Amino acid sequence: MENKENMDIEKEFQHYLDIFKKDKELGKALSLVSFPALFNDKFLQEHSKFTSLNDLVIRSGFGIMNLLEVENVNQEKWNAYIAKNSNCTTWYEFGKLAMIEWMKAKIEEVKNAAN
């Protein structure tokens, strides 16, 4: 992914984060978001070669059982794995992209519930 695209992700992430910080209900939802909600099948299939969260974890070959264990693996190798199998260059960037997609969907969900 080009540096410009990385900057776009950062800018978009900050935009949605600001919206969530200003809204009490959205802020609460953000504080409770989980890995399965962020890295759902739809997100993974659209932005990576993975079909599910289990697929991402198991195919990694790092011997981890869930994403909470990612911090225990070699970060350079984990980033290379993510870059090879997604449209992001690092795990951090992939996580921000997942957050953006989740925040967009959550805002839409709240709008629809209000109508």
Image: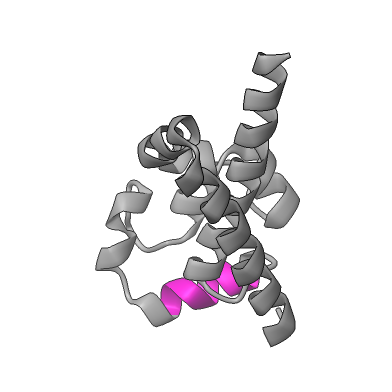
Give the image location of residue 24, x and y in percent. Answer: 43, 34
Quadrant, the N terminus: bottom right
Whether 38 is drawn above or below 106: the answer is below
Judge from the rendering whether residue 106 lies leftward or rightward of residue 35; answer left or right.
right
User: What's the magenta bit mostly, secondary-structure-wise?
Assistant: helix
Quadrant, the C terminus: top right
Whether 10 is drawn above or below 42: the answer is below
Q: Which residues are magenta?
A: 77-84
Residue found at the very far bottom of the displayed protein: 3
Image point (60%, 33%), residue name: 106
Residue 111 belongs to the span the image colors magenta: no
Image point (51%, 55%), residue name: 59
Judge from the rendering whether residue 20 lies leftward or rightward of residue 2; answer left or right.
left
Is residue 51 among what the camera can see? Answer: no
Q: Quadrant of residue 78?
A: bottom left
Q: Quadrant of residue 89?
A: bottom right
Judge from the rendering whether residue 11 lies leftward or rightward of residue 28; answer left or right.
right
Residue found at the very far left of the displayed protein: 72
Image point (55%, 68%), residue name: 93
Depth check: 49 or 102 in front? 102
Q: How many marks?
A: 0
Give the image location of residue 108, x and y in percent. Answer: 70, 31
Residue 83 belongs to the span the image colors magenta: yes
Whether 78 is drawn above or below 105: the answer is below
Give the image location of residue 86, x and y in percent. Answer: 65, 64
Give the image location of residue 51, x and y in percent. Answer: 64, 43
Image point (70%, 46%), residue name: 45
Whether 16 is drawn above or below 90: the answer is above
Residue found at the very far front of the displayed protein: 22
Depth check: 30 or 84 in front? 30
Is residue 90 among what the camera can see? Answer: yes
